[in-house]
Image: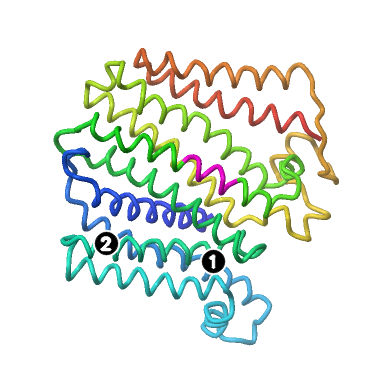
Amino acid sequence: MYIYLFETLLYLSFALTGGYLLLQFIPEKSKPQLKNITDLFQYALLAIPLFSFMSILRSALVLRDFAQDMPFIQVLLIVVKDYSYGNAWVWNLIICTVMYMITQFKGMQGKMTKWVLALLWCASILAHGWASHPAGFSPFWGVLSQSVHVAAVSLWLGTLLIVAWFTNGEWNWKAFVRWFTPMSISSIVLIVAAGIVMMFLLVDGYINSWGINYGQALLLKHLVFLPLVLLGFMNGFLSKITDNGRHKSRLQWWLRAETLLALVILITTAYMGVQEPPHEGEFEQPSPSPLFTFLHGDLQDVSLQWNWNLVYISMIVIGIAALALLFPSYKKEKRSMFAAFACIAVLFPFFGILLSVQ
């Protein structure tokens, strides 16, 4: 269970460092006045190799069961030296340490320093992509798709996190959304494109994957993404014509709600990162997940097909209706109603879809 927490914190660290660096390139008049979070940025830099090391440690503990005559430290060194994700961790340790040293001695002053840190951050993202599941299936497309996916999420979510939780003063909202909205749209396009590439690499049959943990988490992630994108649209566009865009406290609440939805996606992504993708050979005779077994009984085969009925279709339709009702909830500032509709928009289709296949 602990590994899910560390993976989530790892993605949060990438987001905070990416968002912080991006905001360094934005003129003061085009962004909200922010608290000084240089210390948080430095802690997040150190957290990247720390939290990514937990996967190394987990692998070493698993291998230790097959090499009980070897000292644990020797098994750990084998993972670091002989496995691609171990090599990637070493590179990330070096890169993040160099970035930390630069910020300690040079600060964020100087255009060249910002560019050097930005390039090093991109190198850190590539190292993370090298250690990912997709990289195991395609050295080029796997690393590229994972790196683009994490970078786009980090820049979008990181900027949003910092603005939502660390603004201290004038918002400069119109100037901010003038560049942040197109950047968000570009990030979403890249996230979707990279996600499609990774699905082709990892998932042999999207529907069949719903019978196991990885596929269910992927489905949940896609469903949560819908209200997240809609809320981002509302914060970017509807806020200009509603009171939410003219009152700092209201706008800040909705931005923080957007970050909480994004956090659900990060947690789901972290969970997927430690599950076996359904593309692997052992998926030829997979074991249904505990949730799928609870919903369908003791199934032995998860070669799934649609099995529609009126109840399951109604659950999906209710979810779509709840998604549409997010708009009036936002305009009327009905926060609890918005939260309820968001949950319905995710959970009803999720269970409706899982019940519709067997």
Please identify the quadrant where the N terminus is shown: bottom right
Secondary structure, mark 1, is helix
Q: Quick check: 187 above or below 143?
A: above
User: Which segment is the magenta one?
Assistant: 188-195
Amino acid residing under circle 2: Gln
Could you say where residue 340 lies in the image, as x and y percent from the top left? 48, 22
Determine the image quadrant of residue 291: top right
Q: Quick check: 81 above or below 114?
A: below
Question: Quick one: label 2, few (<14), some, or many (20+) residues within 10 Å?
Answer: many
Q: Quick check: 213 above or below 129?
A: above
Amino acid residing under circle 1: Trp
Question: Which residue is rendered at x = 40% and y = 51% of the image?
Answer: 12
Could you say where residue 255 lies in the image, as x and y percent from the top left? 33, 32
Residue occupied by mark 2: 42
The residues tagged by marks 2 and 1 sit, at their Cα atoms, a distance apart of 23 Å
Asked whether, in this view, residue 143 is left or right of residue 308, the answer is: left
Residue occupied by mark 1: 130
Magenta span: predominant SS is helix
Q: Is residue 126 magenta?
A: no
Asked whether, in this view, residue 337 is left or right of residue 278, the answer is: left
Could you say where residue 308 lies in the image, as x and y percent from the top left? 79, 24
Marker disc for residue 17: none
Question: Which residue is rendered at x = 30% and y = 72% of the image?
Answer: 98
